[in-house]
Image (cartoon, grey):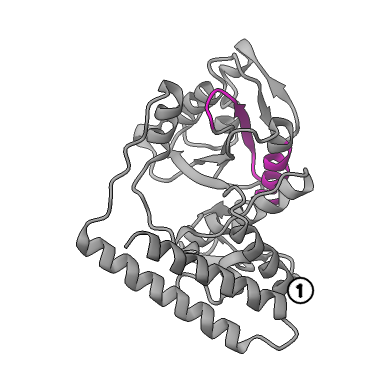
Amino acid sequence: MSKFDSIDEWFNGTRVKTKKSKGAGGGYTATSKRPVNSSPKTNTLKAVQSTNKKLPQVMVKISGASKGADKAQAHVNYIGRKGEIEVENQDGEKFKGEDQKELLKAWAAMGMHREDKTGTRKEAFHFVFSMPSGTNPDGLKSAVRNLVNEEFAGHKYFMAQHLDTDSPHVHVLVAATDDRGARLNPRKTDLHNYRVQFVNKLAEQGIEATASRRVHRFKHKEGLTQAQIHKSAREGSEIIRKQPTGESKKKIEEKHNEIKGQYREYNEKLPSTETQLKLEINKLIKSQEKGKEKTR
């Protein structure tokens, strides 16, 4: 069933966090688990309701990685706009201007490989956390800070907020190795988990959002990169979206029918007490069917 074990995981994320252990011979080990929610169906209900209400979808992506401290420093220079924008680390220390130029020297002194061109493994990941225009910037930054401190506990990081596009966002450079030697190795499921946690952290700041995957709300991938979206926002130009071909339309319809079947099977297995959740799932299915009729 998709990349997750159940529809509850489609909306709530998975329980397992994965890291590449230093002593695991290159294998992957589950080093920790997310807290068990006492009522996952309640969370699923809230998430499906948010999807039906068409609340803003959070965006979390890995925009790149550094194999050396030199490239990581170049990324800090970029997110700090060469000293113009404040950069903050995991200890809450803030840097601006000339203070940003040699921040990665400390990471290199602690063992990070120095040159990206000779690096053999990822030493740092470049994350972007984004929300639509109109999002409270202070709440957004606090939500990202709280998420990073929780998800990447023990990892050094630098973060900076950009408010010069239609989509306010926060860049975070995270050291791949934590203070105990365990290494990050984020997968697609981890990115979805980060999105779910982002929604939770935004809610703590009074900001409504949701984190359903595109396919689970019957949307197809439009092939737009974040760079294209940001360029369009900067230049005020219109984004030209490619329309799916006949063959791709067929594949999209087949996938959507598969998802509908899984939703219906899920509903059939729900206990009779979950009336509201059943109604919201049916509403989600009907929204796809209505959308399909409009395109005919």
User: Is residue 93 located in the magenta-colored stretch of the structure?
Assistant: no
The answer to which of 103 and 83 lies nearer the viewer is 83
Q: Is residue 113 visible?
A: yes
**Residue 98 vertical placement versus 45 (above, below):** above
Q: Residue at x 68, y 28 (%)?
A: 88
Figure label count: 1
Residue 113 position, x and y percent, is: 47, 36
**Residue 75 vertical placement versus 204 (above, below):** above
Q: Residue at x 42, y 35 (%)?
A: 229
Q: Is residue 1 visible?
A: no
The answer to which of 114 and 280 lies nearer the viewer is 280
The answer to which of 208 and 189 lies nearer the viewer is 208
Residue 193 position, x and y percent, is: 59, 58
Quadrant of image for the C terminus: bottom left
Q: Residue at x 40, y 76 (%)?
A: 258
Identify residue for label 1: 39
User: Is residue 151 located in the magenta-colored stretch of the structure?
Assistant: yes
Residue 86 position, x and y percent, is: 65, 21
Residue type at the position of mark 1: Ser
SS for dot 1 = loop
Left or right: 96, with 37 as reference point: left
Left or right: 27, with 194 as reference point: left
**Residue 242 vertical placement versus 237 (above, below):** below
Q: Image quarter for residue 81?
A: top right
Left or right: 120, with 279 as reference point: left
The answer to which of 294 and 135 lies nearer the viewer is 294
Q: Image quarter for residue 148?
A: top right
**Magenta region: which residues?**
142-166
